[in-house]
Image (cartoon, grey):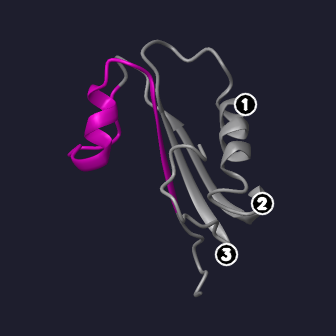
Amino acid sequence: MREDLPEGNFAFERPLAVRLYFFPQARLEADIDNCAKPILDAMGGCVYLDDRQVECLLVQKFEPGRPLPVDDVTGCLKTPMEAEEPVIYVRVDAAPGDER
């Protein structure tokens, strides 16, 4: 992850909310909670200082052939849905209620 971040990036020090959307090419055999932990650990030190800052976590999988619970898919979710390889979409925001 550190190799893909732009030079001069900084790690957040505030409470955060993280979304992880998995777009596998076949049925995901692993438990979804076990898939999230290594990603959160990898983001530590470069996206946030410590994964204890994550106060809100949404993890969801979108397997092929299952209806997507979104009517209008545009923007950044359209690309992973149309990808031929497995994709993990990651979004980090301020935690709900954090006024900093």
**Relative depth, front residue between 18 and 71:** 18
Mark in the foreground, 2 or 1: 2
Give the residue pinned by disc 2. 50
Distance, label 1 to label 3, CA atoms, is 25 Å
Quadrant (top left/top right/bottom left/bottom right) for the C terminus: bottom right
Look at 67% across and 75% down and name the residue there. 14
Residue 14, label in figure: 3
Distance, label 2 to label 1, CA atoms, is 18 Å
- The picture places residue 67, in percent across and down from the top left corner, at 33, 28
Q: Using residue 15 as the reference point, say whether residue 62 is left or right of it.
A: left
**Where are the magenta residues, as a range?**
67-92
* Number of marks in picture: 3
Amino acid bearing label 3:
Arg
Quadrant (top left/top right/bottom left/bottom right) for the N terminus: top right
Q: Earlier in the sequence, mark 2 or mark 1?
A: 1
- The picture places residue 98, in percent across and down from the top left corner, at 61, 81
Q: Using residue 67 as the reference point, say whether residue 13 is left or right of it.
A: right
**Vertical order, 84 against 93 (above or below):** above
Look at 69% across and 61% down and name the residue there. 54
Amino acid bearing label 1:
Asn
Residue 34, label in figure: 1
